[in-house]
Image (tube, rainbow, N blue to C red):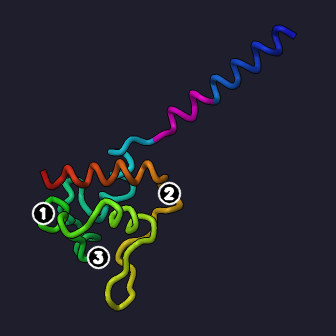
């Protein structure tokens, strides 16, 4: 019985440890989900960024045009241009609300 309890505790601890290791940092989330269009520096000067007409996230005037809630909404729902063509896909199935909040903070830092 003691061995079974110890084994269960060890298994649970290892399982929780694996979850912690798998959590991506904000930088990793940006690199995987955003940088291909927005660029590593946020300027949007990538092939995909130019094609999607991505705005320069280092521009303070541009950033003043949207709230944090607007940015999160764009991440959740994606963005379309005036003709209905997708400019940014939804990340609702890839990023948690907390991930999105930390990405907004990172994006805000681009304009500082």
Vertical relation: 86 (above or below) 7: below
Considering only order in the chain, which callout, 1 or 2, is on the residue closer to the N terminus? Answer: 1
Q: Quadrant of residue 34?
A: bottom left
Q: Quadrant of residue 69?
A: bottom left
Q: Nearer the viewer, mark 2 or mark 1?
A: 1
Query: Contact, CB < 8 Å: mark 2 with mark 3?
Result: no
**Which residue carries the number 3 mark?**
52
Vertical relation: 10 (above or below) 90: above
Vertical relation: 108 (above or below) 74: above
Q: Position of residue 53 (x, y in %)?
A: 24, 76
Q: What residue lies at 37% left-to-right and 75% top-to-bottom?
A: 79
Q: What residue lies at 22% left-to-right and 53% top-to-bottom?
A: 108
Provide the secondary structure element on which disc 2 rests. loop
Q: What residue lies at 15% left-to-right and 59% top-to-bottom?
A: 58
Considering only order in the chain, which callout, 3 or 2, is on the residue closer to the N terminus? Answer: 3
Q: Position of residue 92 (x, y in %)?
A: 50, 62
Query: Contact, CB < 8 Å: mark 1 with mark 3?
Result: no
Distance, label 2 to label 1, CA atoms, is 27 Å
**Which residue carries the number 1 mark?**
59
Q: Position of residue 24 (x, y in %)?
A: 44, 42
Crowd rating for badge 2 (residues with CA inside 10 Å; few <14, some 14–19, many 20+): few
Considering only order in the chain, which callout, 3 or 1, is on the residue closer to the N terminus? Answer: 3
- Span colored in magenta: 16-23
- Residue 82 disc label: none
On the picture, is 10 further left or further right than 47?
Answer: right
Residue sitting nearer the eye, 60 or 25: 60
On the picture, is 13 further left or further right than 53?
Answer: right
On the picture, is 65 further left or further right than 1?
Answer: left
**Which residue carries the number 2 mark?**
94
């Amino acid at each position: 019985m003691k061995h079974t309890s110890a084994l269960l505790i060890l298994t649970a601890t290892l399982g929780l440890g694996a979850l912690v290791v798998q959590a991506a940092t904000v930088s990793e989330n940006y690199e995987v989900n955003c940088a291909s269009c927005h660029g590593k520096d946020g300027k949007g000067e990538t092939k995909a960024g130019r094609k999607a007409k991505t705005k320069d996230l280092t521009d303070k005037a541009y950033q003043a045009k949207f709230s944090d809630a607007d940015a999160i909404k764009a991440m959740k729902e994606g963005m379309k241009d005036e003709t209905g063509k997708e400019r940014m896909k939804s990340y609702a199935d890839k990023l948690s609300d907390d991930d999105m909040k930390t990405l907004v903070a990172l994006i805000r830092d681009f304009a500082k």
